[in-house]
Amino acid sequence: MIPKIIFRYSRIYDQKFRDSKLIQKNLIKRNHKYPSIKKIENYIKKIEKLWKKEGEKILKEIAKITGFKWKEKEIICYVIGIGGCFSDPLTIKIFKNTSYFIDVLTHELIHQIQTQNHNLFIKWFNYIRKNYKDEPKTTKSHILLHAVHWKLLETLFDKERVKKIIKKHNDFKDYKRAWKIVEEVGAEDIIKKFKLITK
């Protein structure tokens, strides 16, 4: 089963980010404004078109690489103006580059499939805690995720797209460290080890 991703704008949900003092402070500092409702809704239309082209193959590839099954028929993706992106509830902010929106969405969907298969994934995390005990928690939780994402991008797109995402994460040291581990060990080898542990 491949889930249907439903892109949704919720005024109530988005208002929490729109009214955030921290977000407002950063916007003032950068002389920017929070995106209008119309801008977000128009952005969703662009994303829906792009996802129609790329979405199914991405969802299938995530399941193929991980060996996990999707457990939900529909996943709602809330699109917000500005704020953090996270997997539950699936929330992605608008980005100038719509391809990067898809990359961030893919990242969060890999988190989603891990959560949906928690009983199997816990075996992997026990292995990570033992073998990467000195690494930060965020790094530990992103080693497999980045390996899966790396493999997916190489399969469906190209190596240049992998390089662009790694570069985007340069300012986030724990993410950067996870990418470095994947580079050193190899995405394929990490995924093979993961499947061996969780079979």
Image (cartoon, grey):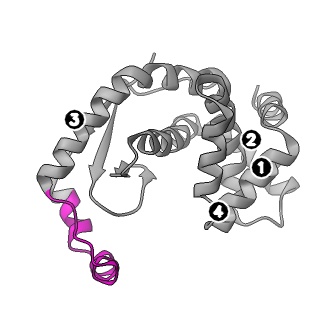
> Does residue 69 lie above or below 45 as drawn?
above
Amino acid bearing label 1? Asn
Q: Earlier in the sequence, mark 2 or mark 4?
A: 2
Magenta span of residues: 14-36
- How far separated are the C-alphas under marks 2 and 4? 29 Å
The answer to whether residue 190 is seen in the rendering is: yes
Q: Earlier in the sequence, mark 3 or mark 2?
A: 3
Looking at the picture, tell me which residue is in the foreground, 52 or 167. 167
Q: Residue 40: percent from the left, percent from the top?
A: 20, 50
> Does residue 165 lie above or below 191 as drawn?
below
- How far separated are the C-alphas under marks 2 and 1? 5 Å
Amino acid bearing label 4? Asn
The residue beneath circle 4 is: 170
Q: Secondary structure at mark 3?
A: helix
The residue beneath circle 1 is: 126
Q: Secondary structure at mark 4?
A: loop
Q: Residue 6: percent from the left, percent from the top?
A: 28, 32
Amino acid bearing label 2? Lys
The residue located at (27%, 58%) in the rendering is 81
Q: Earlier in the sequence, mark 3 or mark 1?
A: 3
Q: Are marks 3 and 4 in contact (CB under 8 Å)?
A: no
The residue located at (75%, 31%) in the rendering is 198
Residue 118 is tagged as: none
- How far separated are the C-alphas under marks 3 and 1? 41 Å
The residue beneath circle 3 is: 45
Horizontal side of residue 32 vs 171, given as left or right: left
